[in-house]
Image (cartoon, rainbow, N blue to C red):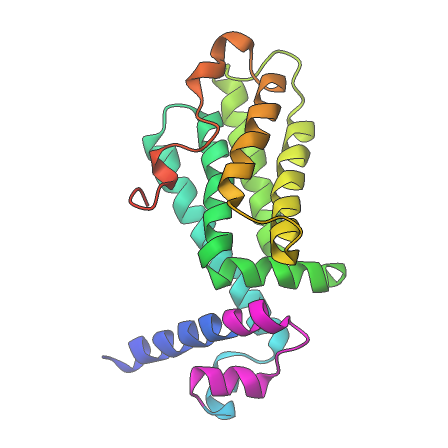
């Protein structure tokens, strides 16, 4: 392994170790000593990669944004309907909330530090931009019911995603997030597309968000 490759590996290891700590203990509850110990590196090695905990938090947000972009690129290349891509994006987010500390840490940090702006809300900003862009594609493709306002739909979709994350994280709701999300899409979809097109969309997500489809 080259020196540059080792440096990149260490940086990513720090990001993922910190994500697990931020997910479990919160941004304020995890110290830089905790992160260094969890990653098995010295404080000097930490500061070689990150100048502060805020910068580290930004790196976690950036990693989460990269995961979202990669998934969206795959959907854009393979799916016929933009609106199905939007449904699948929300289902993939639910999958990540079950298993991916980087995503969970990004959202928990946004809850705790959102009033401080970026980079703590970068993943939310990326998600909103993605939802808006996907809805614009759906509108251009004639998938949306006439008169549907994109800003209203994107706000609704983000509200559902944030609400699911908070309710399941707090334990107020239990069971399958994806099942609950599918039921919510079944309620929302008739207000977004015409009745004649409802059967074209899978509210429970397409094969792209199944465990063997990613």
Quarter assignment of residue 147: top right
Question: Horizontally, is 30 left or right of 3 in the view?
Answer: right
- In the current view of this chain or complex, which residue is farthest to the top? 196
Residue 153 in the magenta stretch? The answer is no
Question: Horizontally, is 168 left or right of 65 in the view?
Answer: right
Of residue 132 and residue 106, the one placed in the foreground of this image is: 106
Q: Return the x and y of residue 68 as percentages of the image width and height.
A: 46, 48
How many numbered marks appear?
0
Quick one: quadrant of the N terminus? bottom left
Q: Residue 120: in sight, yes or no?
A: no
Q: Return the x and y of residue 136 as percentages of the image width and height.
A: 55, 26
| Residue 87 higher or lower than 148, as above or below | below
Identity of the residue drawn at 49% across and 57% down: 64
Quarter assignment of residue 9: bottom left
Quick one: quadrant of the C terminus? top left
| Residue 136 higher or lower than 160, as above or below | above
- In the current view of this chain or complex, which residue is farthest to the left? 1
| Residue 32 higher or lower than 111, as above or below | below
Q: In this picture, which residue range is highlighted in magenta?
A: 19-41
Q: Residue 148: in sight, yes or no?
A: yes
Q: Return the x and y of residue 142 as percentages of the image width and height.
A: 50, 14
Question: Horizontally, is 194 left or right of 170 in the view?
Answer: left
Of residue 36 and residue 3, the one placed in the foreground of this image is: 36
Question: Horizontally, is 26 left or right of 34 in the view?
Answer: right
């Amino acid at each position: 392994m080259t020196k540059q490759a080792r440096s990149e590996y260490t940086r990513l290891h720090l990001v993922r170790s910190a994500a697990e700590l931020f997910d479990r203990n919160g941004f304020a509850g995890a110290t830089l000593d905790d992160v260094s110990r969890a990653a098995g590196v010295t404080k000097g090695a930490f500061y070689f990669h990150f100048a502060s905990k805020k910068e580290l938090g930004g790196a976690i947000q950036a990693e989460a944004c990269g995961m979202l972009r990669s998934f969206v690129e795959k959907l854009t290349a393979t799916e016929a309907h933009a609106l199905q891509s939007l449904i699948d994006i929300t289902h993939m987010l639910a999958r990540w909330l079950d298993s991916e500390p980087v995503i969970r840490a990004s959202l928990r940090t946004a809850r705790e530090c959102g009033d401080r702006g970026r980079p703590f809300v970068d993943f939310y900003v990326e998600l909103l931009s993605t939802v808006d862009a996907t809805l614009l594609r759906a509108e251009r493709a004639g998938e949306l019911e006439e008169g549907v306002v994109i800003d209203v739909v994107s706000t609704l979709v983000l509200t559902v995603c944030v609400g699911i994350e908070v309710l399941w994280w707090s334990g107020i709701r239990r069971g399958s997030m994806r099942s609950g999300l599918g039921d919510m899409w079944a309620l929302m979809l008739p207000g977004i597309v015409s009745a004649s097109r409802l059967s074209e969309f899978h509210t429970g997500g397409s094969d792209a968000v199944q465990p063997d489809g990613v």
